[in-house]
Structures are given as structure tokens and as C-alpha cells.
Amino acid sequence: MKLIRRSEKVVGVSAIIIMLFSINCSGQPVPQKVKDTFIQKFPNAKNVEWEKESDTEYEAIFTLENIEHSANFNKEGIWLETEVEISRQDLPDAVLATLARDYWDSDINEIAKITTPDETLYEVEIRLDDEEEEGDESEEHEDKENNEDEEEHYETVDLVFNASGKLVNKVEIEDKD
């Protein structure tokens, strides 16, 4: 009986170890060059988890000074970018001015600062009012709309700005369901 219980424990522990390794980068090891560059760039990182973004890119998700970050590296170990969530107050005034002027009626969902070797960008995820329908609407149609899920009336968009407030990329986000 003790032998069976011990073997069950060994099998259980082995399954947990296998599961942890499969979560870490989908079962594929992170190249040592990538790990070395990461350690040099972020020596105080904690709780590091790796994901494989593509055949040529790896992403580390980690905590630095109690804030979650992500950093991407190519398979040669070259750092590509770091992303960290920030607050609205941390956006440059020029980005805030562009948002106020061009997206004044939008709700901000998330804001991130993206640092690359060449520049710093600001990604702002917003929710735009979906204005597909124009003209007069009947009361019946309005009642039907009011009862539908509110998310159906909005479009989520990622806006990427440079530090001077210029919009450099706009991407519609598909439903996360």
C-alpha cells in the first residue's frame, strides 16, 4: 500500500513538473543568449515567465519594482522592446493633447509605454462609440438596443503615439472572447 501511494506521489509531482515546463515557452527552451541579455538588462527582475512570440522572438513577462513588465528579444538575444502599463498622468502632454482633440469622446481602457532601442512610444487602448446606424430610430429599436449587451455598441482600438503626440499606428482589436 505504501509503495502505491509513493508511486502516486511521484507521478503527481512529475506531472506538475512537466506541466510547468510546458507552460514555460510552450515546451521549447529559451536560448541562452536570450536569457543572458535579459539578465544583463533586467538584473532585478522577479517572477520571470517566458513565452515564445514567434519562431524568432521570445517574450519575458516579469515584475520589476512591483510593476509588471514584458520584454521581447530575438533568438540571437537582441533586445527589441519593453512594455509597461502606465497611468494617464504618465503620458506626455502632447499625447494627452492629441487624445483630447481627436478622441475626446472615447473611454481609455489601458495605457502602456513601449521602449525600443530607437524610440519611446505610447499605446492607448480606447473604446470608440460604434456609430453604424444613422438617421431616425424608432422607440422600439432604441428599447431593443438598450437591452442588448453594451459591448456590442463599441469598437476597441489600439492607438500608438510617439512622444510628440503623433499617431503612428491604429489597430482595431478583435473581441477577446
Image (cartoon, rainbow, N blue to C red):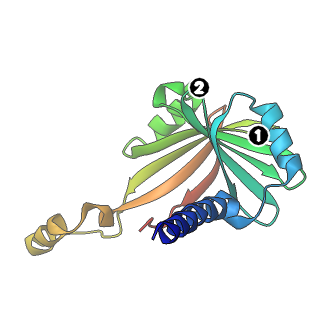
User: Where in the figure is residue 32, as x and y percent of width and height?
Assistant: 86, 49
Q: Residue at x 82, y 62 (%)?
A: 56
Dot 1: element: loop
Q: Residue at x 15, y 67 (%)?
A: 147
Q: Residue at x 89, y 47 (%)?
A: 33
Instruction: Identify residue for label 1.
Output: 116
Q: Which mark is residue 50?
A: none
**Which residue type does callout 2 highlight?**
Glu
* Disc 1: CA contacts within 10 A as few (<14), some (14-19) or many (>=20): some
Q: Is residue 93 above or below residue 80?
A: above
Q: Is residue 110 above or below residue 131?
A: above
Dot 2: element: loop
Instruction: Identify residue for label 2.
Output: 65
Q: Residue at x 75, y 29 (%)?
A: 43
Work out how far the residue at label 1 is from the one at label 2, CA to CA, in angstroms. Answer: 20 Å
Q: Residue furthest front?
A: 1
For this rendering, which residue is in front, 80 or 111? 80
Q: In the rendered view, does 140 fall on the left or right side of 42?
A: left
